[in-house]
Every structure is written in structure tokens, then in C-alpha cells.
Image (tube, rainbow, N blue to C red):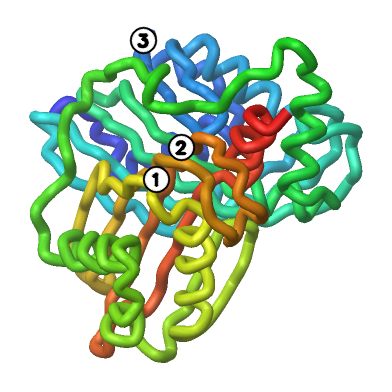
Amino acid sequence: MKGFSNRWKDFPDYIIGITKEIWEDRGLATLHDYYSDDIVVRSPASIVIGNKDVIGATMSTLAEFPDRTLLGEDVIWSGTPEEGMLSSHRLLSTATHTGDGVYGKATSKKLVYRIIADCHAINNQINDEWLIRDQGAIVRQLGWDPKDFAAAQIAAEGDNAKMPFTPDVDQPGPYKGRGNDNEWGGAYAEILTRIMGADLAVIPEKYDRACNLYYPGGVQGQSHGDADRFWTGLRASFPNATFTIDHQIGRDDPMMPPRAAIRWSLRGKHTGWGAFGAPTGADVYIMGAAHAEFGPWGLRREYVLFDEPYVWKQILLQSA
């Protein structure tokens, strides 16, 4: 890959390799090299600019979860080494809560949860990122309900309680791309757009009847009914919110099924009964990411992430 160290055989190898080097091999100092000085990292919680703050946040996480692993399940990517590449990296993380920190006093509880990180890289360095952890799965495994966790966080912050990330506070990064025009990215984008347009007939039409589903909160499901319940519950809470496809990638790779990575957003008022309880009228922004794998009978596997506690935090801050 032009501009990248020859120790990496391809872009997925680079993404998976530096992730292990940083987190599990304790190479935090390599973030000075792998992350640009002015990197923009957006998550549902906040926006962070600069690799120094990223290093600080990484150290805090390792202090709370020192045995954390990051197992790369897939890297769905687009672009070229010359123009820059965007990776949508899906990880399965394991960790033991053995240190005090953001999640409270150490509990020694073992966690398993997913992450999707979209990173733009050029010349052996990442300079733009969108990061979503399954916080709903994390807090549930620690004994919290996501709404209660958000309320406790607000109480702890007091008068300094911060509204989570929205596009209003976004800072432009160097990446201006929208992905690629591969057919599988287009197929998944069409499915999600139809679902958000209340065309739920697309689920039995396009999903394999034996599909496996992985949803926020560590929820696992199968078949059409579970897909319908998840997407209906989300959309019902925000029935008039604007759904946007922010980034779209499709790929066909040897020894892999056709697959897609979509970064999406939902922005509008909490005006309906659904996954987020009684309507409050709160303005909510949801940063979402989803991966899909296709087979001969339709969508075979779907992985969807958004951050439940930070959706609740937006609702609760406006309901006080």
C-alpha cells in the first residue's frame, strides 16, 4: 500500500494490527504516529480533537478495564492508498471491570460487547474517526438499566452536565467521501431507507428467514419477527425524525460473503411510544452504524449499533 509501512499486507491488516498494538500490546505511544495531531474523533458521547486527548481517554479505559481485548470481526472499507481509505471496523471486545472509573466502583464483572469504528487513513495515519460502542450492553452487564445509568451520569455531573454529540458541535475533518457505489452497499441502504419509511414488508422480502441479528444492548435475535421488533421499536419512538445515510460501503472479497457497512443518523423529536418509553418531545440525535452480510436467500447477518445511554441522556437533560 503506497504511503503505508510494508509490515501490513493490506488495509484490513493495518487496521486490525494497529488496534491490537495500541490496546493489547500497550503501545499507547504509537498513537502519536498512527493518529494525526489534529484528528477528529466523534462518538455519541462527545467530540475529541487531537491525539493527546485520545491517548488520555485510552489510558482511562485501560485503568478501568486492564485486560480489555479488541477482536477484529471484519473490516469493510473503501478508497485507495493514494486518495485515502475509510475502514468500518467491527470489533468484539472482552473486558473485566477491575478498576474504578466512568462505570463506577470496580465490580470484577466480565463484559462482552461490540464496537464499530469508521476511520479514515492516509500515509500510514488515521486523521478522522466515528466511534460507536455498545454502551447499552456494557451498562446492562454491570447491573444498570441504560436510562438509570444516564440519570446517574447527569446527577454526577451536576450543573456541568454535558449534552451528548450532535452535528451542531461537529468539526470538519479531512475526510469528505461518502463510500463507494458497490451494489451491496446500495442494497442495504435501500433496505434501511424502506424500513425507516415504514415499509416493513421489506424485512420478509429481503432478509433471509434464518437470519442472525445483533442489536444494541447485546441483544441477539433471529428471523423476520426479531428484525421487525427492533426496527419498529426504534422508529416508533421517533416517527417523524429524519433518517439519513451518512456513509455507504459495499464489498465483494475472496472467502467472504457480500457485505455492506452503513453509517446512518436519525434526528428529530421523541414524539412516539417505542423503545424509549413515553414520548417527551425531546430533540434527539442518534449516530448509528450497521454491517450486513448477504447470502443466497437475502440478508443473512445484521449488526447494528447505537448508544442507548446517550440517547437517554439527551431525553433526560431536556425533561428535567
- Label 2 with label 1: CB-CB less than 8 Å: yes
Asked whether residue 199 appears in the rendered view, the answer is yes
- Label 3, residues with CA under 10 Å away: few <14, some 14-19, many ≥20: some
Say which residue label 1 marks: 266
* Image side of residue 141 versus residue 23, left or right: right
Say which residue label 2 marks: 285
Q: Earlier in the sequence, mark 2 or mark 1?
A: 1
Q: Secondary structure at mark 1?
A: strand
Say which residue label 3 marks: 38
245 relative to 150, above or below: below
30 relative to 285, above or below: above
Q: Earlier in the sequence, mark 3 or mark 1?
A: 3
Q: CA distance from mark 3 to mark 1?
A: 27 Å
Please state which of residues 87 and 130 is positioned toward the viewer in this rendering: 130
- Label 2, residues with CA under 10 Å away: few <14, some 14-19, many ≥20: many
Please state which of residues 317 and 90 is positioned toward the viewer in this rendering: 317
Q: Residue at 79% x, 43% y: name it.
A: 148
Q: Residue at 56% x, 44% y: name it.
A: 307
Q: Amino acid at mark 3?
A: Asp
Percent from the top left, x then y, of residue 122?
A: 21, 26
Q: Secondary structure at mark 2?
A: strand
Q: Amino acid at mark 1?
A: Leu
Q: Residue at 61% x, 25% y: name it.
A: 58
Please state which of residues 246 and 241 is positioned toward the viewer in this rendering: 241
Percent from the top left, x then y, of residue 45?
A: 56, 29
Q: CA distance from mark 2 to mark 1?
A: 6 Å
Please state which of residues 143 and 316 is positioned toward the viewer in this rendering: 316
- Label 3 with label 1: CB-CB less than 8 Å: no
Q: Secondary structure at mark 3?
A: strand
